[in-house]
C-alpha cells in the first residue's frame, strides 16, 4: 500500500481549499475581492480547485479606484471571462461624485482611503456576508494580526482585540445581521510561497509582474511609473528602466523594482534572494504612518 506525504506547498493548498469550502458552507452570499494581482489570482485558482468541476460559487468583485495599471485591468477581464465567473465592478469615482468626497492632493495622491466607502457600499448593495481576500500575514504588522475569519461590525470596522480563536481548524463564521466576515485563505502563505505555487501550477499572470521597459521617476529611492495620476515637477527626471512589480496596487502608490526576471523561475530566484518584504520595498501608502494599514483596516478597508 503506497502512501503520499504532502509537501509544503500541497499542505498550504489543502488548508486554503478547506477554508474555501468552509466559506461556501457557512455563508449565504460570499464574494471574492479581485484586483488582477497575483494574490487574488492565486485565490481564484484555489477556488477553482476547491469546487471543480463546478464554477466557483461566488462572484469576483473589484473596487476600481481609477488609478489601476492597465495590464491588471485587462487581465481581470480576461480571467473572469475565461473561467465564466460573474465580475462585479464598482468605481471609487462614482462614490466620490455621489458623496461629494474630497480627493487627497499631492504628488502621489492615493484613493486608498476613499475606496473603503465604495467597498462598504458594495457589501451593503449585494448583502455580502463574507468577502474573500488575498492578504497574507507576512506582508506587514496589521495583517499579521488577522485570523482566517475576521469579523467586521455593522459599520465595517475591525477591532484587532476582538478576534475569535481558531483551534483545530474550526472556523466560526457566525455573525449578527449587518456584520461581515473578511476571510483570508492564504494567510499562512509567504510571498515566496505564492510565487513558488504560481510556478508549480503554471498560472498565468499579468505581464507587469515580469521584466519590461517602462518610463519611471526615482523618488526617495523608489521607482514610480510615469502616468496621468502623479504630479511630475521640474525636479523629476524621467528615465527608462528595466523593471517589474512585486505587488500591484494603484499606480500612485506602487513602486517598481529593477529586474531582468522574465520567467517564473527567475522571479522565484529573485524573491529567494530578497531580504525586504514586497510592501516594505514597493508600497508608498504604507509609509504614511507606522500604523497606516491598521488605521485603514479599523475604518473598514479590506
Image (cartoon, rainbow, N blue to C red):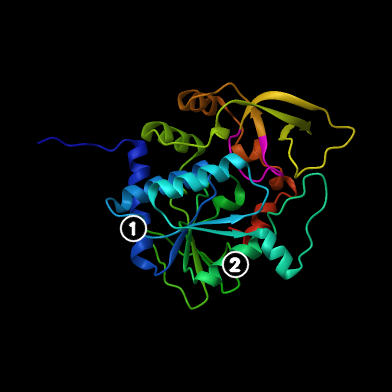
> Where is mark 1, residue-wise?
21
- Quadrant in which the N terminus is drawn: top left
Q: Residue at x 36, y 62 (%)?
A: 24
Answer above or below: position of 196 versus 148.
above
Answer above or below: position of 52 versus 93.
above
Q: Position of residue 150 (x, y in %)?
A: 50, 62
Splitting the image into 4 quarters, where does residue 298 fall? bottom right
Callout 2 secondary element: helix
Callout 1 secondary element: helix
Q: Residue 120 carries which label?
A: 2
Q: Residue at x 74, y 35 (%)?
A: 226
Q: Residue pushed farthest top?
A: 260
Neighbours of disc 1 within 10 Å: few (<14), some (14-19), many (20+): some
- Residues in magenta, as a range: 245-255
Q: Which residue is drawn at 37% across and 43% down?
A: 12
Which is more toward the observer, 189 or 268? 268
Q: Earlier in the sequence, mark 1 or mark 2?
A: 1
Answer above or below: position of 152 versus 91.
below
Q: Where is residue 212 in the image (x, y as percent from the top left)?
A: 61, 26
Which is more toward the observer, 249 or 13? 249
Q: Residue pushed farthest left?
A: 1
Amino acid at each position: 500500500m503506497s502512501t503520499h506525504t504532502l509537501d509544503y506547498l500541497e499542505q498550504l493548498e489543502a488548508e486554503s481549499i478547506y477554508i474555501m469550502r468552509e466559506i461556501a458552507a457557512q455563508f449565504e452570499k460570499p464574494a471574492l475581492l479581485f484586483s488582477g494581482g497575483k494574490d487574488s489570482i492565486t485565490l481564484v485558482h484555489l477556488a477553482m480547485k476547491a469546487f471543480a468541476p463546478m464554477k466557483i460559487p461566488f462572484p469576483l468583485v473589484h473596487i476600481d479606484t481609477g488609478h489601476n495599471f492597465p495590464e491588471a485591468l485587462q487581465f481581470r477581464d480576461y480571467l473572469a471571462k475565461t473561467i465564466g465567473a460573474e465580475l462585479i465592478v464598482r468605481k471609487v469615482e462614482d462614490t466620490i461624485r455621489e458623496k461629494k468626497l474630497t480627493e487627497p492632493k499631492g504628488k502621489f495622491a492615493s484613493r486608498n482611503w476613499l475606496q473603503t466607502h465604495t467597498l462598504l457600499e458594495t457589501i451593503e448593495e449585494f448583502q455580502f456576508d463574507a468577502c474573500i481576500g488575498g492578504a497574507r500575514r507576512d506582508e506587514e504588522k496589521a495583517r499579521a494580526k488577522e485570523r482566517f475569519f475576521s469579523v467586521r461590525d455593522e459599520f465595517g470596522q475591525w477591532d484587532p482585540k476582538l478576534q475569535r480563536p481558531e483551534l483545530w481548524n474550526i472556523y466560526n463564521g457566525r455573525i449578527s445581521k449587518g456584520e461581515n466576515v473578511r476571510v483570508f485563505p492564504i494567510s499562512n502563505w509567504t510571498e515566496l510561497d505564492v510565487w513558488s505555487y504560481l510556478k508549480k501550477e503554471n498560472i498565468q499572470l499579468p505581464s507587469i509582474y515580469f521584466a519590461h521597459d517602462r518610463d519611471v521617476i526615482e523618488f526617495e529611492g523608489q521607482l514610480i511609473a510615469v502616468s496621468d495620476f502623479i504630479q511630475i515637477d521640474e525636479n523629476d527626471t524621467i528615465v527608462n528602466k528595466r523593471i517589474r512589480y512585486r505587488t500591484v496596487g494603484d499606480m500612485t502608490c506602487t513602486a517598481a523594482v529593477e529586474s531582468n526576471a522574465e520567467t517564473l523561475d527567475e522571479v522565484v530566484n529573485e524573491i529567494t534572494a530578497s531580504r525586504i518584504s514586497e510592501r516594505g520595498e514597493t508600497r508608498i501608502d504604507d509609509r504614511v504612518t507606522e500604523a497606516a494599514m491598521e488605521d485603514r483596516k479599523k475604518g473598514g478597508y479590506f
